[in-house]
Amino acid sequence: MSKHHLSKLLVVLLFAALAMTVVACGGQQAATKAPEPTKAMEEKPAEQPTTAPAKEEKTAPQKITLAIEHFSVIEGTTWSGAHDRAGKRIAEKYPNVEYIYREEVGPDSTVPFAEELISEGANIVAGNAEFMGLPLKDIADKYPDVTFASVIASDLTTKPNFVRYFPRQYQALYLEGLVAAALTKTGNIGVVSAFPSVQVIRRQAGFTLGVQDGAKLLNKDVKIYVKYVGDWYNPAEESEIAKTLIDQYKVDVITQQSDSGSPLDVATKAGIWYVGKDMDIVGEYGWSSTDTVAISFDTRWEVIYDSMVQAKMEGNPPELIMYPGMESTFTLADGTVEPTVDIMNDGKVGVDAISPKADVPQEIKDLVAQRREQMMKGEWDPFTDHAFVSNGTGLDLEGNPVPEKGKEVKPAGEEPTAEWLLSQFNFDLEGITILE
């Protein structure tokens, strides 16, 4: 072997020996780039021991106790009867709501009864008339967790937990007026009324506008005679006034803004048409029949009480001035949806509620159906559509005397505020005759 080949062999053997030494000491070859991992190759996190998920604890809904103080007896009354029915319907719908009440509550007993009801768990306490509901404001600060409420006659006093409320009954009264205008043959319609007040004047205005629109449509001359009793409930006086309206003023359609059943009794005996208020008196109480009762309107106070209950359930402050109309509804426990007010008779609603014995022309029925639907959609209102022209009669209020006869207080097409309607509407509309 030549020296050259020998040297080459020694170099090869030297490199081989070095390689073996590196391997023996733990050396590694340079790593080649690995392929990108696929989902199957991704490293999974170590599994944690599984535990049963914690059960959500369901909190029971808040117990609501709705207490209504009724100014009169309940049985056989349309006003307190409708409030009582509302309380029962609310309690029937909600398992966590209880309804309790007191009857024949006067202003002096409002607060003692309220505190008694609160001791029984009441967290909503309402007075169903202003004269005996207003004293509730005096204890509102003492019970900040209780919602107090009172019907509005004309006072609008509120506190954060003292609510004022009334339904837009004039909308249903307008529809009744359309029917009444069609019914009269003598052209004379009579109203047995309680006494001049914003509440009474406002409701009579709704009826008057309906009569006037109905008379215009039928090209009839119709007069409205109003005579006051001086009280909400005086059966003997109400009866005498009804007889006077029939005998002296030849009315053949009669309605009332008072609370006894006397005008209905007189109408039944005289064989003239009667237009009812506050409840479906034929369907609810079986009073008289559709031979005498041409139409009534029904008030669903539960729309308002439900708003108070919902606010309490949700922990929200209540709405302080509530004045809902036909666009607002309440869904009964059986799923029936009812607006705040509606025309009813013998269990029927809408145009179907007009007595089958009543000779009401189709054009009036069509207008009743149209206006009712528009009001339920919130698209039309008689108090917005019509001008308010003063009759020169009414009730002088402090700083707000009755406008002179013929003065246009509100133009047609202008919407009056709820506050004005509830507290300042103090004059009769032109076209009414107020009897002494």
Image (cartoon, helix red, strand yellow):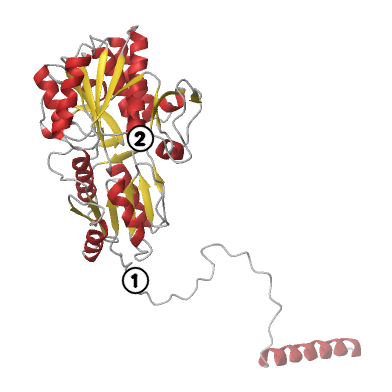
Tell me if residue 250 comes above or below residue 420 in the rendering: above
Q: Position of residue 94 (x, y in %)?
A: 24, 52
Quadrant of the drawing holding the C terminus: top left
Report which quarter residue 112 is drawn in: bottom left
Q: Position of residue 396 (x, y in %)?
A: 41, 35
Q: Residue at x 23, y 9 (%)?
A: 186
The reply to whether residue 283 is visible in this rendering is no
- How many dots with numbers? 2
Q: Nearer the viewer, residue 245 or 174?
A: 245
Q: Residue at x 28, y 36 (%)?
A: 337
The reply to whether residue 297 is visible in this rendering is yes
Residue type (three-letter) at the residue carrying disc 2: Arg
Residue type (three-letter) at the residue carrying disc 1: Ala
Q: Determine which residue is flagged by label 1.
A: 54
Regarding mark 1 in the picture, which secondary structure is present there?
A: loop
Label 2 CA crowd tier, 10 Å (few <14, some 14–19, many 20+)? many
> Position of 402 compared to 301: left or right?
right
Q: Position of residue 350 (x, y in %)?
A: 26, 24
> Position of 12 compared to 130: left or right?
right
